[in-house]
Amino acid sequence: MLSIAYSELIQLFRNRAVLVTNLIMPVAVSVFFVYYRDAFERIGSLGYVAAVIVFTIGAFSLYTTAVTTLAARWQNLFLKRLRSTAARDPAILSGLVLPVSVLALVQVGLILGVFAAISDGPANAALLAVAIVSTFVMLLALGMATAGVTRSPEHAQVTTLPLSLGTIAVASWVGISGTESLTLVKRLLPGGSATELVVNTWNGGVPVTDSLPLLAPTLAWVVVAIAFALKMFRWEPGR
């Protein structure tokens, strides 16, 4: 797995289009939210800013990049060749998505670290870390599912757009308006409960016992995405 991950990391940094579009641009957008945090706090809260940062990095640096990577390896038959080696399927997939996962975690960790240093929060760093990891696991699982219907890296720009923009829109909706109204709808949407959890852990004021159940919808989306990926994912063209 580690050898596959190392090779994929090298390929990732050689692909300037992916590097700029899926890795550098999300960081730039996140820095913009941090810089104008006072303005965004007036329409939401500092927790809302943290949630948007998490989902911007997750949607583009992780989800979109993972789908693009898997589609490219599917198209050039690299996945098929890997299956002819001694590596098992879980190790192959883990190796392919490990670099983008680590990079996304490093990005969100550094940006939120700076954000925390210049503002108040987070109120509960440990639960915030759990919220981020669960969100990224959900987006990674959804990425593998989306890869099953993506035929090329170019096609990934289309197939990833609804979910990447949709989760950010949900994060903004929940982060600004809260969940006092349409509670069930907001929490069941992909990223809705995760946004509420990030906001709570950053702003504080909500007991941990009330926040922990918010992990359930996110984990449910992980199960749904994995089930869809097992059904739709293809290792080579024509299969």
Image (spheres, helix red, strand yellow):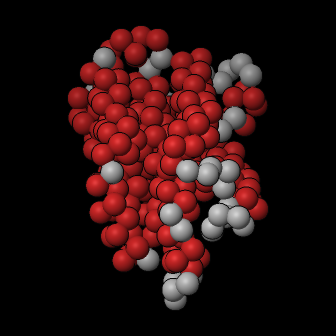
x and y percent of residue 176 in the render?
54, 18
Quarter of the image holding residue 207?
Answer: top right
Tell me if 203 is positioned left or right of 224 in this view: left
Any part of residue 211 in sight: no
Which sits in the foreground, 194 or 163? Answer: 163
Which sits in the foreground, 80 or 148? Answer: 80
Residue 147 vertical placement versus 45 (above, below):
below
The residue at 55%/60% (across/down) is 75
Q: In which quadrant is the C terminus drawn? A: bottom right
Residue 175 vertical placement versus 152 (above, below):
above
Quarter of the image holding residue 14?
Answer: bottom left
Quarter of the image holding residue 27?
Answer: top left
Tell me if 104 is positioned left or right of 191 in this view: left
x and y percent of residue 69 in the render?
47, 55
Which sits in the foreground, 140 or 15? Answer: 15
Residue 222 vertical placement versus 213 (above, below):
below
Q: In which quadrant is the N terminus drawn? A: bottom left
x and y percent of residue 127 in the render?
48, 48
Q: How many marks?
A: 0
x and y percent of residue 184 in the render?
76, 31
Which sits in the foreground, 9 or 234? Answer: 234
Tell me if 109 is positioned left or right of 158 in this view: left
The residue at 34%/34% (across/down) is 25
The residue at 33%/20% (across/down) is 37
Any part of residue 79 in sight: yes
The residue at 38%/61% (across/down) is 99
